[in-house]
Image (cartoon, rainbow, N blue to C red):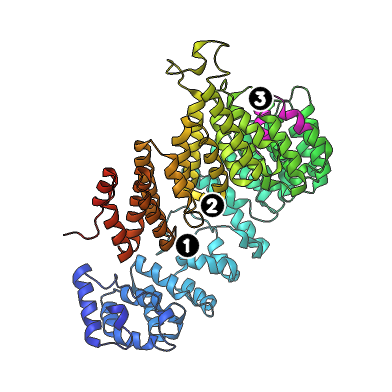
């Protein structure tokens, strides 16, 4: 109410709003006027002030400036034009309590045109205001001539800074604007804070970090603490070295800690400092760490990353391949060389290293898989995809699982990927990684015709194994080769077909368009096997294109002939699909399909017609043609169809 009527509204409504706020919270400080500077016409802020003036002045007499603060925030950049409001803010600085004065200082210094002059007035009135953040921002950046009192031997104790409180002017990038005298004074203040044993460690570490930013002095101030006994201070100093005015000069010192207990911080700081180093000098420093046998593994891995990201490609490739091939190199360091080599593929020795890693121990094979297709330029993708394919030949199940997942992403550049994935998914001797291969196969089927062929190949192999009872998993000639209700396995080929069908159904719910052609072809293949008709029907009901091929409903109904339970289950799935996909299918086309299925008179046809009638009938608000269709179904010759139609309701009592 106050926000809407403060400008040009009824004075009675404004007064009522403010009285209500006072009754609720005891004062007008909770008044939220919104962003009036965005809604008021130019000059209308004066009307708002006049409407609120009695309440603002009454509050000021009680040293309550909350409504004045709320108005200043609401009018934003227009506040400087309200001279009386500005006078009230200065009055709050002079006579308000400490919290009130802090708020008033921030609001009074907001106008850019006058803040430089006003900050001098504030400091002249109360020097301890130099401890306030709004004042410090202006003094350290624009009015550096006012810094000297704040950098004196004794801090400016007073109203805003209690006597005896450890304090120093915070140092940031603006310290470069200060004169050398002021920089030396700031360094002295920070040194006192660093050396104060009574301060918490985080305050002392903060002082070390600030010291690093002082030009010409920062490096020397920080280096005194890099070997401190206290871990917090030593690590703060190492981290601060990378933020001095000459970070490249600190790189040798940071890398020297790569083999010590501070490697975690030092190597990260070295990464920051390396951005400022000349590559010709950086190469030697990184090489010393990468090839040092006594350096920590983490540090050597970080050195490999620095080499790949900071050095020229030929130098980086030579260094990483040398470290990889060096006898005695830790396997994790070799893996890092492989993982960071994605940007160095223009050098042939790097490919030799990657080929070796693709056939080596699991940790190196896994490093090969860390590169994704989008990490590489197009000319290198097909060649790298062959490396990923080679990784899948591992005997380690965990690595194979990762490799099959990765190979699916590389399938567009690997003609052999669908064949490899299909072979792994149908290998009944593998009981650990076949699911990853099946997942990858379905992903590949959604992306290319080769993938779709691979999916059909896998389904045919599994269906044949199930149908003929020939299983590579069982002993030759044994009666249990099919593993029919065995203690540990039960028809593994059938289980894998069911898993692939479930994946296809899952894709139908999320992104049906891409995989629909492959799924429909897979369903037609399974329909050739009597044992897999339910799976074929499941694929069909999920992937049938109701917009383009509603006539396939007739073929689906014929497929379920003699299977009443399957027909009921499939009709229920079709109904659920129509409820989920509210824009799928043309009602007029589907009405003709429903009538055609109804006229057939069969059990499956009738249940599908009932599912169509309910789904589209509800969608159209039970339009007259669909109500007539429902009446016909309620007189269907099959009892199950009549019951299904009678359970549909067009209007409730």
Q: Left or right: 574 with respect to 203?
A: left
Give the residue at x 45% y 82%: 78
- Residue under circle 2? 513
Q: Nearer the viewer, mark 1 or mark 2?
A: 2
Spatial CA distance of label 1 from label 2 is 64 Å
Question: Split into 4 quadrants, where in the image is the C terminus?
Answer: bottom left
Numbered disc 3: secondary structure: loop
Q: Is residue 59 above or below residue 269?
A: below
Name the image quarter holding residue 339.
top right
Residue 285: x %, y % from top left: 77, 39
Look at the image and say whether residue 28 sits in the magenta stretch.
no
Give the residue at x 56% y 50%: 514
Spatial CA distance of label 2 from label 3 is 34 Å
Q: Main secondary structure of the magenta part?
A: helix
- Residue under circle 1? 131
How many other residues sit within 10 Å of disc 3, few (<14), some (14-19) or many (≥20)?
some
Residue 5: x %, y % from top left: 29, 83
Name the image quarter holding residue 30.
bottom left
Q: From the viewer's side, name the closer residue of 638 and 85.
A: 638
Q: From the viewer's side, name the closer residue of 566 and 440.
A: 566
Query: Marks 3 and 2: in contact by CB < 8 Å?
Result: no
How many other residues sit within 10 Å of disc 2, few (<14), some (14-19) or many (≥20)?
few
Question: Can residue 336 be seen at all in this image of the molecule?
Answer: no
Numbered disc 2: secondary structure: helix
Residue 387: x %, y % from top left: 72, 34
Q: Earlier in the sequence, mark 1 or mark 2?
A: 1
Q: From the viewer's side, name the closer residue of 526 and 379.
A: 526
Numbered disc 1: secondary structure: helix
Residue 347: x %, y % from top left: 83, 41
- The magenta region covers 353-370
- Residue under circle 3? 394
């Amino acid at each position: 109410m106050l926000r809407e009527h403060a400008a040009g509204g009824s004075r009675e409504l404004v007064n009522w709003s403010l009285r209500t706020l006072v009754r609720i919270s005891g004062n007008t400080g909770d008044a939220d006027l919104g962003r009036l500077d965005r809604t008021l016409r130019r000059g209308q802020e004066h009307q708002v002030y006049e409407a609120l003036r009695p309440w603002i002045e009454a509050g000021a007499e009680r040293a309550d400036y909350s409504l004045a603060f709320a108005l200043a925030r609401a009018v934003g950049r227009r506040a400087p034009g309200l001279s009386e409001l500005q006078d009230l803010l200065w009055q709050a600085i002079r006579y308000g309590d400490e919290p009130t004065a802090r708020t008033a200082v921030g609001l009074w210094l907001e106008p850019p045109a006058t803040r430089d002059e006003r900050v001098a007035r504030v400091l002249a009135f109360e020097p301890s205001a130099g401890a306030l953040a709004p004042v410090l921002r202006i003094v350290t950046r624009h009015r550096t001539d006012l810094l000297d009192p704040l950098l004196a031997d004794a801090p400016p104790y007073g109203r805003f800074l209690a006597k005896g409180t450890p304090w120093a002017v915070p140092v940031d990038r603006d310290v470069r604007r200060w004169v050398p005298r002021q920089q030396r004074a700031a360094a002295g203040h920070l040194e006192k804070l660093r050396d104060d044993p009574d301060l918490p460690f985080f305050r002392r570490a903060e002082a070390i970090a600030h010291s690093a930013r002082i030009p010409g002095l920062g490096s020397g101030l920080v280096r005194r603490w890099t070997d401190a006994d206290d871990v917090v201070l030593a690590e703060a100093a190492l981290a601060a070295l990378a933020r001095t005015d000459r970070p490249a000069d600190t790189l040798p010192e940071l890398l020297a800690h790569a083999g010590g207990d501070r490697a975690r911080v030092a190597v990260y700081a070295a990464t920051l400092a390396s951005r400022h180093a000349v590559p010709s000098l950086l190469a030697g420093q990184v090489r010393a760490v990468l090839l040092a046998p006594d350096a920590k593994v983490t540090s050597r891995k970080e050195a490999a990353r620095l080499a790949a990201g900071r050095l020229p490609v030929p130098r980086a490739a030579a260094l990483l391949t040398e470290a990889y091939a060096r006898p005695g190199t830790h396997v994790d360091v070799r893996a890092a060389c492989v993982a960071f080599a994605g940007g160095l593929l223009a050098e042939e020795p790097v490919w030799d290293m990657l080929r070796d890693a693709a056939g080596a121990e699991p940790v190196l094979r896994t490093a090969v898989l860390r590169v994704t297709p989008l990490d590489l330029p197009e000319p290198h993708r097909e060649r790298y995809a062959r490396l990923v394919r080679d990784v899948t030949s591992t005997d380690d199940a965990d690595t194979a699982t990762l490799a099959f997942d990765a190979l699916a992403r590389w399938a567009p550049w690997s003609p052999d990927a669908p064949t490899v994935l299909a072979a792994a998914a149908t290998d009944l001797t593998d009981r650990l990684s076949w699911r990853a291969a099946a997942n990858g196969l379905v992903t590949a089927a959604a992306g290319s015709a080769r993938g779709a062929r691979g999916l059909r190949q896998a389904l045919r192999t599994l269906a044949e194994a199930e149908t003929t009872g020939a299983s590579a998993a069982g002993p030759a000639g044994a009666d249990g080769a099919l593993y029919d209700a065995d203690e540990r396995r039960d028809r593994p080929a059938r289980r894998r077909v069911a898993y692939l069908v479930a994946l296809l159904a899952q894709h139908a719910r999320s992104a049906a368009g891409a995989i629909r052609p492959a799924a429909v072809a897979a369903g037609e293949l399974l329909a050739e096997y009597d044992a897999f008709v339910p799976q074929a029907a499941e694929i069909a009901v999920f992937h049938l294109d109701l917009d383009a091929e509603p006539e396939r409903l007739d073929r689906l109904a014929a497929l379920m002939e003699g299977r009443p339970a399957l027909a009921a289950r499939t009709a229920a799935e079709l109904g659920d699909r129509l409820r989920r996909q509210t824009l799928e299918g043309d009602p007029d086309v589907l009405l003709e399909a429903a009538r055609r299925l109804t006229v057939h008179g069969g059990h499956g046809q009738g249940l599908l017609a009932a599912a169509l009638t309910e789904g589209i009938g509800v969608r159209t608000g039970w339009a007259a043609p669909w109500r007539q269709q429902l009446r016909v179904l309620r007189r269907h010759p099959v009892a199950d169809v009549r019951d299904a139609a009678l359970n549909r309701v067009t209007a409730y009592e």
